[in-house]
Amino acid sequence: MANYLLINDEQADLLNSIKEILHKELAPYVKEYDQKGEFPMHVLKKLNEAGFHSLNLPTRYGGLGIDKVTECLVMEEFAKVDAGFAFSYLTSGILFGFYEYNPDVSEELRAYAADRLINGDITAFALTESDAGSDAAAIKTTAKKVGDEYILNGTKCFITNGGIADFYTVAAVTDKTKGTNGISLFLVEKDRGVQCGKEEEKMGLRLSNTVELIFDDVKIPAANLLGRENYGFKYVMHEMNLARPVNMAFAVGIAQAALDYAVKYAKERVTFDKPIIQHQGVGFMLADMEMLTQAARSMVLYAAMAIDKGLPLGTLSSTTKTFASEACMKVTTDAVQVLGGYGYMKDYPVEKLMRDAKIFSIFEGTNQIQRMVTSNILARSK
Amino acid sequence: MNILVCVKQVPDPVEIKFNSETASLIRACAANIVNPFDKYALELALQLKEKHGGEVTVLTMGPPQAVDALKECYAMGADKIVLASDSLFEGGDTLATSYALFCAIKKTGEFDLILYGKQAIDGNTAQVGPQVAERLGVAQATCATGIELADDKVLVAREQDDCQEIIEVKMPALVTVAKLAVEPRNPNIRRKIAANKIEMPVISAADLEGIDAARLGLTGSAVKVKKMFAPPVRGAGIKIENETADNAVKALVDYLSNAKAI
């Protein structure tokens, strides 16, 4: 925060409140839950009581309606304490496929979903399958229309919040013959018979809940179709395009936390009669880490500003995602290096930050896919 | 059920600094917080409201920045917040402060129950609550750790060294609150944002009919502070370690007699 100059009083106020409550309610549990690989439900309850859920829900549905820039600042603040919890908690209130730009979604369905969130329910987005990650169009889960209902069958994997969600946005094939034009989105309540499979044991973001979801003849009313039939893939691509750069605010938070710790350590740790930050080899590393973190934050907030203004992102979605995730990996790896042997030990927080960092180069479309997208846009440009 | 909670904004003890040359607190560098015991009082008030209905009003007397304390109370769930602020109130001892608060409470409304923190962590007098009760002519109980309502009575739990005492007081009553078993709730972010937009009633001395200005602030104080100083820093003590108690006692006696203490 100290590193972002263009912050207004209202944002500063909000961030201070967040810092205060996370310091009190989340920070003391991070180490324990990182070891256990578990989502701390009691922390979610405390934060919900304090009104921090669904911050970005529009005000007409009872949310705070914060803009994307503020959302990014909030995400960074959360991620500085723990990115796993941040990722689970802040996405638990995001209605995938519902937003303003999607006028196809009926007002009834929006109000229904928003209402559930305001009352503390958790939601999750189920797209990925074991054979469909970055090539999301390869999903095999089907939704078959029978009378007034759709019947869902298939298995989703790596679903963030899958195990704790009360309802889901699920992508399923409605017309096998049409490829990307044959996928639709559905709102599926858990109590319609969605089963949770195994909970993933992850390298990082261990406070987030990630599970397999099984749909075995799950029947939902036809009114739960989100928007238009067979338009699902378009909605997904559009929303992912906007979410991708914004979600890198978590990576910025991780990088900032690693940098802060490394700087503190380098000022205290003395070798050859001086603090190691005074040794050029270490000092320059820290300077590079600072550059990368500042640059990543700038890109994320620049993309967020463009989204707030409704501007087309062009290459910005993929480039921001790729740059920020790789900056985060480099900064956390170097933080471990600055701390030397201690950095490698679990008694110090930087090894965890390095573990947390890795996923950002993988999910939301791998960085290889993002480079492909970016170069394709360049190739098409006039 | 109308409950009033009186709170005080105090310097955050974590950040407090003392200027030894001028012998005063460096206010500029100290962040301000709601007195912790007052937050317990508010928590108790909010619990009573949740159980029995009614309204919780929070009153504070202080400089204009005391508004921040009130906003925090609003964010925690208080229905109304009132600031009493006037240069005439400044510098008062407990006598002048309780007089001003008594007048401000009369102006604010009628209450079944008035709660105070048992003491403020800056002055630590624990006098203002009881004095206000006397001025209002209502029953009082101090250092409560729990309150239950029974018709027109309040059952107040108080922790003693070896037992818990439950006393009964008739309403209207004034109760001061000690540390509770539960921590005060977190401020709600939505209410916090709303607090920035609400209109805050400010009571000044001129709003209080029949108030005697000579009994306010420094002029109205019976206690005059002659001098303030930071106590000298105490050095570390010594620890006598010995294999047997007898030898340790002998070493201690030797030490004390060498120091001519015995």
Image: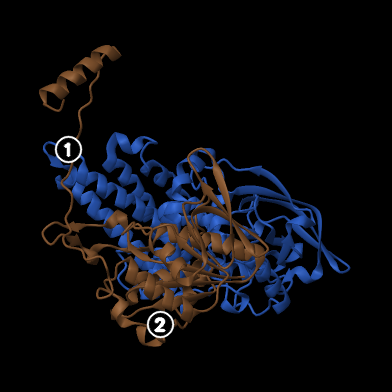
Q: Can residue B178 be seen in this view?
A: yes
Q: In the rendered image, what is the letter of the chain coloured brown?
A: B
Q: In which quarter of the image is the C terminus of chain A?
A: bottom left
In the rendered image, the residue lying farthest to the right is: A147
Residue A287 relative to residue A328: left or right: left
Residue marked by disc 1: B235
SS at mark 1? Answer: loop
Q: Which mark is residue B202?
A: none
Q: Which amino acid lies under the numbered mark 2 shown in the image of this protein?
A: Ile
Q: In which quarter of the image is the N terminus of chain A?
A: bottom left
- x and y, in percent, of residue B150 in the image: 67, 60
Q: Is residue A308 above or below residue B243?
A: below
- What separation in Å lies between label 2 and label 1 (alpha carbons)? 48 Å
Q: Which of marks 2 and 1 is nearer the N terminus?
A: 2
Q: In the rendered image, what is the letter of the chain coloured blue?
A: A
Chain of the residue where label 2 is placed in the rendered structure? B
SS at mark 2? Answer: strand
Residue marked by disc 2: B203
Q: In this view, does B258 lie above or below B57?
A: above
Residue A146 relative to residue B186: left or right: right
Q: Is residue A214 above or below residue B239?
A: below
